[in-house]
Amino acid sequence: MSEALFDIVFYGILQPGKDKDVVMQNMAKMFKTEPAKLAAYFAGGRKVIKANVDDLMADKYRVALENIGLVIKIEEVAAEPAPAEPPAQAPGSTPSPTASPATLTAKIAQQAADVDTGDITLAEVGADVIENPIEVAPQEIGDISDITMAEVGADVIENPKEKEKAPIPDISGLSLE
């Protein structure tokens, strides 16, 4: 029997109180890359940082990444069934260039029907579905009773700064060749 494998997954969530720029810098140092290349990891959604590692390595990654400020999830990799063999063709026959859209649609519908969704449920309306929500302390705002709204279409900038128009350079000497 083979050992269980895990994915180290990041959903773009930082630990409370951590600064995104500092965390990105630290992560860039850890992976020896530029912080700009890691921006996609912080945009949200499921991002696998390291795939198919054993439990000891997964725990090492989790500790290291949590130390720099990420919220990490370790997910067990489901065993994938062996790929199905394509049907054998008769000798002398030519392979079909592509399946028709109707055939593909029917195949996708059959695959969807084969998926067991027995344990999937919907959360109640208003239920908190975020696993690790970030706590945000309420902030005190002053008295705002004297704030009013402008009419629709009103110019809300009272004294706009006039920008000096930049001179257009002489381009009469340019030609297209």
Image: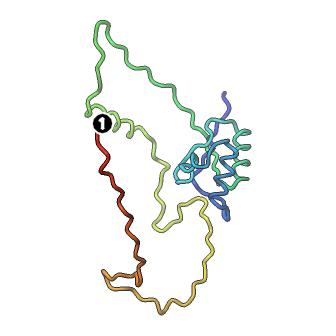
| Figure check: 94 above or below 116 | above
Query: Which residue was labeled with disc 1?
Result: 105
Q: Mark 1: which secondary structure?
A: helix
Side of 118 relative to 100 (left or right): right
Q: Quick one: 110 or 5, which is closer to the camera?
A: 5
Q: Residue 133 at x, y = what percent?
A: 59, 63
Which colour assignment does the render follow?
Answer: rainbow
Q: Residue at x 35, y 60 (%)?
A: 168
Q: Quick one: 111 or 24, which is closer to the camera?
A: 24
Looking at the picture, which amino acid does disc 1 mark? Thr
Q: Quick one: 116 or 129, which is closer to the camera?
A: 129
| Figure check: 97 above or below 31 | above
The tally of labels here is 1
Q: Around disc 1, counting alpha carbons within 10 Å, would you say few (fewer than 14), some (14 to 19), or many (20 or more)?
A: few
Q: Residue at x 39, y 36 (%)?
A: 111
Q: Residue 62 at x, y = what percent?
A: 70, 47
Q: Residue 21 at x, y = what percent?
A: 63, 57
- Quadrant the C terminus occupies: top left
